[in-house]
Image: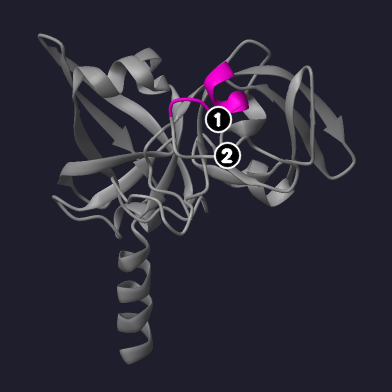
């Protein structure tokens, strides 16, 4: 379980093709390696880390960074397969039992990919819009929560095919959203509460 509060920006070292997916090597910020300036202990092999909102397991750690594996299902639902060496990614380690929940409950189970289709600047603030599949948009409501590339955000407007969010300067400066432009793809995870409500209504009909 995650909160959608990004701990830092990692850098992609390399992607290696495997028979059933890819191996992804990420160089995290030094603060995340050493466990400084936060309540988390240093990351270890077997830990869960959200990369652009997708929960993956650390399979090894060396001087190059943290290594992960992503299979076909993960690659079909996320933008991880489109990454290249040097790209920045949002990183968040799993929430400890005594941690503070500052965003919302994020599972790290990405529902699908959205596309940036609106970018309106007003001073240092940005209104960003995303086109999404109707299956995803149907689980969103205005003032509800959504995770975009692993970032916990509040939805401003929503319909079945798109939604918008208002981004403060801090979010733009410490996450990958500050680098996104029209046409860029992002990972979308809807609020888990919406999924259960939708399934309840389907079962009840």
Q: Say if residue 10 shows up in the picture.
A: no
Q: Name the side, left or right, on which 194 lies relative to 12.
A: left
Q: Residue furthest bottom?
A: 204
Who is closer to the viewer here, 73 or 90? 90
Instruction: Indicate whether residue 34 is drawn in magenta.
Output: yes
Q: Is residue 2 above or below residue 27?
A: below
Pointer 1 or 2: first along the chain: 1
- State which region is magenta: 30-37
Residue in view at x 44 percent, y 30 percent: 7
**Residue, disc 2:** 41
Q: Say if residue 127 shows up in the picture.
A: yes
Residue in view at x 26 percent, y 50 percent: 145
**Are there few (<14), some (14-19), or many (20+) residues within 10 Å of tag 2?**
few
**Residue, disc 1:** 35
Q: Check disc 2 and report its element: helix, strand or loop.
A: loop
What is the x, y in percent for residue 155? Answer: 20, 44
Place residue 179 in its image quadrant.
top left
Q: Residue furthest right?
A: 19
The quadrant of the rendering that contains the C terminus is: bottom left
Q: Check disc 1 and report its element: helix, strand or loop.
A: loop
Q: Is residue 13 above or below residue 104?
A: above
Q: Name the side, left or right, on which 81 lies relative to 103.
A: right
Total numbered circles: 2
Who is closer to the viewer here, 2 or 148? 2
Instruction: Indicate whether residue 12 is drawn in magenta.
Output: no
Q: Disc 1 vs disc 2: Cβ atoms closer than 8 Å? A: yes
- Measured in 3D between alpha carbons, the distance from the residue under mark 1 to the one under mark 2, in whole angstroms, is 5 Å
Residue in view at x 37 percent, y 63 percent: 192
């Amino acid at each position: 379980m995650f909160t959608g509060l990004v701990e830092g920006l990692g850098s992609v070292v390399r992607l290696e093709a495997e028979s059933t997916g890819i191996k992804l090597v990420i160089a995290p910020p030094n603060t995340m390696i050493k466990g400084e300036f936060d309540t988390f202990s240093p990351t270890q092999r077997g830990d869960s880390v959200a990369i652009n909102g997708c929960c993956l397991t650390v399979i090894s750690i060396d001087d190059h960074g943290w290594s992960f594996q992503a299979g076909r299902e993960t690659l079909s639902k996320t933008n991880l397969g489109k990454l290249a060496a040097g790209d920045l990614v949002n990183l968040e380690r799993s929430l400890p039992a005594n941690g503070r929940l500052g965003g919302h409950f994020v599972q790290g189970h990405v529902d699908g990919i959205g596309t940036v289709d609106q970018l309106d600047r007003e001073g240092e603030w940005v209104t960003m819009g995303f086109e999404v599949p109707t299956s995803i948009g149907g689980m969103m409501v205005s003032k509800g929560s959504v995770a975009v590339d692993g970032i916990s955000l509040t939805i401003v407007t929503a319909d079945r095919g798109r939604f918008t969010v208002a981004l403060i300067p801090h979010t733009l400066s410490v996450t990958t959203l500050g680098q996104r432009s029209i046409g860029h793809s992002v990972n979308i995870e809807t609020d888990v509460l919406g999924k259960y409500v939708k399934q309840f209504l389907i079962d009840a009909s």
